[in-house]
Structure formats: structure tokens, C-alpha cells
Image (tube, rainbow, N blue to C red):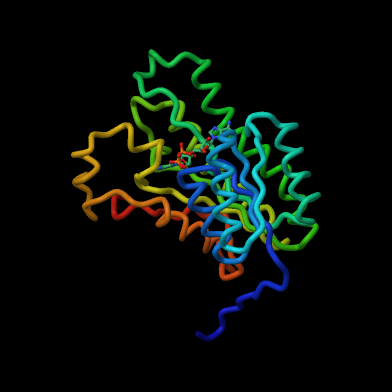
Amino acid sequence: MPNLRFAAPKERRVALVTGGARGLGGATAVRLAEEGRDVVIADVLEKEGQERVAEIEALGQKALFVNVDATDESAVQASVKQTVDTFGRLDILVCCAGILGWEKPFEEQPVEQFDKVMKINVYGVYHFHQAAIPHMLKGGWGRCVTITSGARHGGPTQVPYCVSKGAVYSFVGSLGNAYSKDGVFVNGVEPGRALTDMVVPRFSAEHIAAPGNPLGRYSDPEEVAEVIEFLCSERNTYTTGSVWSVKGATG
Ligand code: NAD
């Protein structure tokens, strides 16, 4: 392929995945490790987090679970410091920690619920990028990916969630343009429905077996992780400030 300026990795890369204990984050953590990265799992789910660590170590990579609440700025800073103290660097950040919040009409969504969703889905993303990017700038290379959602276009019974995902969309656009010349690319991924613990309990088994969408199924987390892995890789030489869809022709 002519004129593709791939920058082959010269050193071992280190990734931190928030929400990496399960779901899209869990699949991403394992996929990043399959491609040779050491991985830090930053999550509040100790048992599942340790299971991902064992899976990654079985692949021959190093891994560490850090129990950190994404809403706690000083704990986030400490988790990034622990990453750099342990592995000597931080090159890749993937933010998958998130919650759906209540599905109720707007007038039944108290501001406390809005606050809770925004604190995890937006402030958590903000804290992790602020803590991680200086280390990437120091190394002259970095890749960040956050999960937004088609819900950013609006959903009448998920107002806090939809607003949070709209905010993440703008965040990615802002940072994607900020650091491109420094080698730090910031992108987003927008899944359709991927079969995780956030999604499966909301639907009947019959619906999940035949959701009536163009591909006739929802995605596996691994199908989303594949796209995230590309955006985090050295093969991504020209995508920053973008949100890529993995929506199976659903818009
Ligand atoms: P999930 O519930 O399986 O995983 C979410 C992870 O985030 C869990 O491991 C959870 O412990 C962690 N987490 C939650 N709050 C946290 C906190 N305060 N601090 C640290 N970790 C925390 O859900 P998922 O489907 O894998 O979702 C991952 C991300 O993708 C979310 O941001 C979600 O909104 C987004 N998303 C998912 C879908 C989908 O179809 N699954 C679609 C669009 C967007």
C-alpha cells in the first residue's frame, strides 16, 4: 500500500482502560493485550477486574487492577501515577467507565440523578484525560478513545445519559484538535447496542435473539473492541477528533 506512513512501535506500549473489568472495557483491555500492550484495568469491580488481569497475563502481557472510582479526581490522579510508577509510561487511555442511569420521563429525573450520570460519564472522562495526557505528551505519542453513544442525539426517557454522551462527543472533538501536532490523538467510538451487562437486562431474550435491526443481531463487545484497538494503534496515523460508529447500519 503506497504512502501509508505507519509508525511501527519502537517500545512496549502501556494502556489504561477505565471500566475495564467487564463489557466493552473488558473486551478492549484483552484486545489491546493481544496486540502486545501491558494493561491497567481501572474499575470499581475488583473480582471481574482481577479476572481480566489473569486473562491478560495468560496472553503473556503485564496487567494490573486498580480499584478507582472515576468520579474521584485525586483517586484518578493516583491511579495514573501508579500506572507510570509500575510500568514506567502511559501511552493509551480508553474510557469505558459509564452508567446508563434511570430510564424515566424527564419530569421524574431529579437533578441528583443528572449529577450522578454526569459525574461518571463526563467528569470521569475529563479527570482521566487530564491525568493521562501529560505522560503521553512527554513520550511524544498517545492515543485516547472514549465511548459515546447514538443516544447523544436524544432519547426522551434517558435525558441525563443522552446529555452526558453529547458532552463526551464535544470533548473528543475539542481534544482531538488540541494535541494532533504533539502525536496525541483523541477519538470516540459510538456503538450500536453491544451485548453487555448494561444492555442485556433491559430487553427480553426474544428481542435480543431477533432485534429487527439490519444485521439481525446486536454486536458482541469484541466487535467494538476491534475498532477501539485500531484507533489506539500505531496503524492509526490520521484519525483524531473523530467519533467512529460501530452501529451495524442503524444510523
Ligand atoms: P458495563 O456496565 O458492562 O460496563 C461499565 C463498566 O464501567 C463496569 O465495569 C463498571 O464497573 C464501570 N464503572 C461504572 N461506574 C464506574 C465508576 N464510577 N468508576 C469506575 N468504573 C466504573 O457497560 P458497557 O456496555 O460495557 O458500557 C461501557 C461504555 O460504553 C459506557 O460508557 C456506555 O455508556 C457505553 N455504551 C455502551 C453501549 C452498549 O451497547 N453496550 C452503547 C453505547 C455506549
Between 78 and 187, the one nearer to me in the picture: 78
| Residue at horizontal 44 percent and vertical 26 percent from the top | 101
| Residue at horizontal 70 percent and vertical 66 percent from the top | 12
x and y percent of residue 122 in the render? 57, 34
Residue 181: tell me if it is visible: no
Between 112 and 156, the one nearer to me in the picture: 112
Does 56 appear above or below 211? below
| Residue at horizontal 61 percent and vertical 69 percent from the top | 234
Does 52 appear above or below 118? below
Q: Quadrant of residue 235?
A: bottom right
Q: Quadrant of residue 183?
A: bottom right
Between 2 and 15, the one nearer to me in the picture: 15
Q: Quadrant of residue 140?
A: bottom right
x and y percent of residue 169 in the render? 51, 43
Between 48 and 102, the one nearer to me in the picture: 48
Question: In the current view of this chain or complex, which residue is farthest to the bottom?
Answer: 2
Residue 207: tell me if it is visible: yes
x and y percent of residue 10 in the render? 72, 73
| Residue at horizontal 41 percent and vertical 50 percent from the top | 221
x and y percent of residue 236 in the render? 56, 67
Does 89 appear above or below 18? below
Q: How many marks?
A: 0
Does 178 appear above or below 140? above
